[in-house]
Image (cartoon, helix red, strand yellow):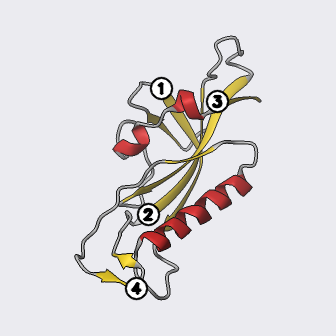
Amino acid sequence: MSLTRVVLASGRSLDLAELQLSSTYGGMLEGYPCKPVNEMRIRGLRHCAARAFPNTPVHLVPPAREYPDQYSGAFGPVEVLPEVACVGSFHSTPLTPSNDPVLHRSHLVLIWFQPTPTVPSGCEAVPELREVDWEGLARDHEL
């Protein structure tokens, strides 16, 4: 049973099996949102996703970045990512037509950022998530 279904722009339906939501800057004790901090946060999400799903490819959906301040601090200009970091395990029908759809699924772990802590659903998911190249990134596996 899936938590929800997301429909990609290509028309492919993805079932969301597992979802982790966290505040993008919730654990930040000092400093400010900037490129080095954001890259460290993204590396941490990738690492955790790869450890949690060792046999599944992981893909970062490139996040929107805002630059609200014209001044630079010690680590460069302020660079803000959307407020919620998401890691989701998705599966869909097999990529390879010869694979039995009863015994096989394609799967991919996606990391993305969104402005609110909502579960993506149908065609209501953030546009960047709906544009994922599933056929190029996911991998088939046998159930």
Q: Which residue is mark 4?
A: 74
For the C terminus, the image quarter is top right
> As rendered, which of 6 and 109 lies closer to the eye?
109
- Answer with the quarter of the image where residue 17 lies: top right
* Tag 4: amino acid: Ala
- What element does badge 3 sit on? strand
- Answer with the quarter of the image where residue 56 lies: top right
Please provide percent x and percent y for residue 42.
54, 62
Please provide percent x and percent y for residue 11.
42, 24
Q: Which residue is mark 3?
A: 106
- What element does badge 2 sit on? strand
Above or below: residue 75 compared with residue 101:
below
Please provide percent x and percent y for residue 14.
52, 33
Reading the chain from its start, which is encountered first: label 2 or label 1?
A: 1
Please state if 11 lies on the left or on the right of 105 as rendered.
left
Reading the chain from its start, which is encountered first: label 4 or label 1?
A: 1
Tell me if mark 1 has few (under 14), some (14-19) or many (20+) residues whose alpha carbon lies within 10 angstroms of its own.
few
Q: Which residue is mark 1?
A: 12
- What element does badge 4 sit on? loop
Q: Which residue is mark 2?
A: 84
